[in-house]
Image (cartoon, rainbow, N blue to C red):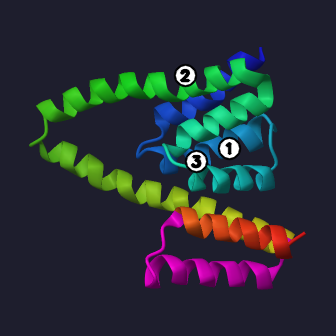
């Protein structure tokens, strides 16, 4: 039964999520934290931060980690398969259809309407992480990490993986 739940927990977000790994993270969080309770919001946030620091697509890393945490190697295999295989099949079919109708005004409008939805989902996820950070680490640490991360990314053009690693080190040293 746990393999079926893992399969559904990653299949559904990958089928209805449009825009790749970052766009489905809120949907995966809703399944993993909200529906099944396999992780807390804090654990999910830490897993996401670690996943962002490592190379390769975020959705497969998250699926592999959660699957392994819940049901071992078999769980990791099921979760990664549920993430990759349906997306691959849907992408092949959708690309063929979109390519055939690439000049259609309807297809162009559809793409324009999807972007704001993804942006709002990402904003909602960010707000949730921000509130969780304030509740667990305090306003000072949250503000300091946010400002330093923003400066490192925007002003100094530091790779996001190094920013995440720096934040992890800061958290290990100064936040209990």
Check the picture and name the quadrant holding the N terminus.
top right
Q: Was residue 32 drawn as part of the magenta stretch in this picture?
A: no
- Please report the residue visible at 28 percent of the width from the left and 55 percent of the height from the top: 112
Q: Which mark is residue 25?
A: 3
Q: Looking at the rendering, which quadrant does residue 97 occupy?
A: top left
Q: Secondary structure at mark 2?
A: helix
Q: Give the magenta part as a residue range.
A: 137-160
Report which quarter residue 96 is drawn in: top left
Q: CA distance from mark 3 to mark 1?
A: 9 Å
Circle on res. 30: 1
**Which element type, helix, strand or loop, lies under badge 3?**
helix
CB contact under 8 Å: marks 3 and 1: no
Q: Position of residue 174 (x, y in %)?
A: 84, 76
Q: Which residue is mark 2?
A: 81
Residue at 33% x, 30% y is: 91
Looking at the rendered image, the disc whose residue lies closer to the viewer, 3 or 1, is 3
Q: Residue at x 70, y 17 (%)?
A: 74
- What is the C-alpha distance between the residues marked 1 and 2? 19 Å
């Amino acid at each position: 039964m746990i393999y079926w739940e893992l399969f559904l927990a990653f299949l559904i977000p990958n089928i209805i999520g449009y825009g790749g790994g970052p766009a489905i993270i809120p949907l995966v969080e809703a399944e993993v934290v909200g529906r099944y309770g396999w992780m807390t919001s804090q654990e999910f946030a830490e897993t996401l931060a670690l996943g962002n620091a490592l190379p390769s697509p975020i959705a497969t890393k998250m699926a592999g980690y959660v699957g392994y945490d819940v049901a071992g190697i078999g769980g990791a295999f099921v979760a990664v398969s549920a993430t990759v295989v349906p997306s691959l099949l849907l992408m092949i079919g959708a690309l063929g259809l979109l390519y055939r109708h690439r000049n259609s005004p309807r297809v162009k409008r559809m793409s324009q309407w999807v972007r704001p939805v993804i942006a709002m989902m990402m904003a909602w996820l960010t707000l949730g992480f921000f509130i969780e950070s304030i509740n667990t680490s305090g306003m000072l640490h949250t503000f300091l990490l946010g400002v330093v991360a923003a400066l490192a990314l925007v002003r100094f053009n530091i790779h996001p993986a190094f920013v995440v690693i720096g934040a992890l080190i800061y958290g290990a040293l100064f936040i209990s």
